[in-house]
Amino acid sequence: MIRLPASLERKLKELFSRAEDRNRFVAEVLTVALEQQDLQFQRDEQPSVGGTLHLFTDGGSRGNPGQSAIGVILEDPVRGEVIREHYERIGVETNNVAEYRALVEGLKMAKRFHPNRLLCHLDSELIVKQLNGEYKVKMSTLKPLFDEITELSQHFDDITFTHIPRSDNYRADALVNKALDEHPVPSYEKPY
């Protein structure tokens, strides 16, 4: 039998006068919570892949700054399959912030698979050169993201950041556009 805190017991007595109704309610709430916990555990439980993984990331905005989104694809080149993909709107940001945020999300995703080697492919030459130490990060909005990527990179034994042409990053780019198209910005009509 589960013993609830006295304050919770009082609240339940206010809501349900009959003990049978209170017990049924508590049982239903616990059942739902445990099922959700099991689902979350199953989603989080992922096999350790090891080996080499490829990470393709892209961020973009419609306007600069403008409505922005990220797209991330994690691929196992040996099996030739996508392990995970992710896309989401991130609000009003610049292109560069979106590019950095996509990489942050991708590194978090890749970390769960414990690759021996991670090859990160980005179509932003600026971001790649900053990450590889060829350019300094001058914009204050990018510095915390750069620092977060530096910290996340410590989780990988071997990590490289490579610039690829936009045409070779079409899948991550398509996810960015999907995120922006599926959740368009509401338009406001001007009153006449």
Image (cartoon, rainbow, N blue to C red):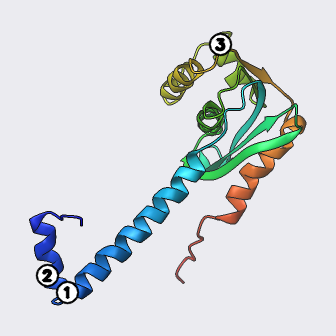
Front residue (pair 175, 33): 33
Question: How many C-alpha atoms fall within 10 Å of the one at disc 3: few (<14), some, or many (≥20)?
Answer: few
Label at residue 13: 2
Asked if marks 2 and 1 touch (Cβ < 8 Å), the reply is: yes
Residue at left 64%, top 38%?
102
Q: Is residue 16 visible?
A: yes
Does the residue at mark 1 contact the one at mark 3 (Cβ under 8 Å)?
no
Tell which tag, 3 or 2, sits nearer the viewer: 2
The amino acid type of the residue labelled 3 equals Tyr
SS at mark 2 in the image:
helix
Type of amino acid under label 2: Lys
Is residue 90 visible in the rendered image? The answer is: no
Give coordinates of residue 190: x percent, y percent. 55, 76
The label number, if any, that marks residue 135 in the structure image: 3
In the rendered image, residue 135, in percent from the top left (x then y), is placed at: 65, 13
Q: Is residue 75 above or below residue 164?
A: below
> Which numbered disc, 1 or 3, marks the residue that appears first in the sequence?
1
Rendered residue at 54%/84% (across/down): 192
Marks 3 and 2, how far apart in space?
65 Å
Residue drawn at x 52%, y 21% as measured from the top left? 151
Q: Quadrant of the N terminus?
A: bottom left
Label 1 to label 3: alpha-carbon separation: 65 Å
Q: Going by the picture, which residue comes out furthest to the front?
A: 1
Q: Secondary structure at mark 1?
A: loop
Residue designated by label 1:
16
Give the left or right position of residue 52, taking residue 148 as reference. right
The answer for how far apart the CA atoms under marks 2 and 1 are is 5 Å
Residue type, mark 1 in image: Phe
